[in-house]
Amino acid sequence: VELLSPASLALVPQMAKPDVDQANGQFFKYFEIGDVTRAGAIVNYREELFEDLPSRGRLRVQANDVIFAKHRNSRGTALIVPPDFDGQIVTTGFMGIRPRDFDEALLLWSVFESEAFRTQVYYLAVTAVQAEIREDIFQKEFLLPVPADPDERKALIAKAREVHDLHVATQQGLQGMRDFAAAVFQGK
């Protein structure tokens, strides 16, 4: 195993005031940590005007960003942002990484699903009330375990791709069932 420092990773920045001002009057999809399963599936979201979303909704994500819950009690909640949430908003209770490519997204997601990563979230979270990971602590003190052997790294990415593809197929199947049920029940 190699231990990589997150300092070289591109973090998804929180929206600055000009971004917030520009977003006002626009509709966005928004989800929070509780809207995501431990398996990384988004099971609920809201779609509202930006100004009607919670003020903690200040992380604008792109498709294939990898996000994980910063809160100690939510450790283990991580996902790859799906294409239908490209340019949308999530809670700042997540920390986001903007990977260089999809393989890196799959690798990071695998790492964030590991017990080695979850343990670091537990022990490096700070503050007394709602202990969470700060960006500076993540970048300076975390170590991300990845397979040193290139074949093992490819195998891990391949396994993550299998799970990702199953998530996509499940969401598509679920939407197809909903669409069909709506048509049947509406007599179409």
Image: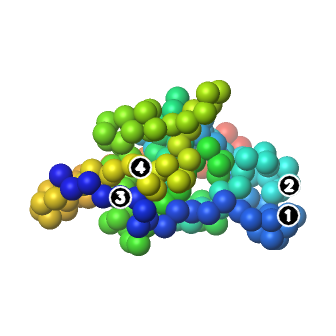
- Residue marked by disc 1: 24
Mark 2 lies on a secondary structure that is helix
Residue 96 x, y percent position in the rendering = 53, 56
Query: Which residue lies at the image location 46% right of the left edge and 45% below the top edge?
Result: 78
| Badge 3 element | loop
Between marks 1 and 4 in the image, the one whose residue lies nearer the viewer: 4
Other residues around mark 3 within 10 Å, as few (<14) / some (14–19) / many (≥20): some
| Mark sitting on residue 51 | 2
Cα separation, mark 2 vs mark 3, equals 36 Å
Q: Amino acid at mark 3?
A: Ser
Distance between the alpha carbons at the discs numbered 3 and 4: 8 Å
- Name the disc covering residue 5, or none: 3
Q: Residue at x 49, y 49 (%)?
A: 137
| Residue appearing at x 16%, y 59% in the figure | 148
Asked if disc 2 and disc 1 are in contact, CB closer than 8 Å, the reply is: yes
Would you say 22 lies left or right of 61 here?
Answer: right
Secondary structure of the residue carrying tag 1 is: loop
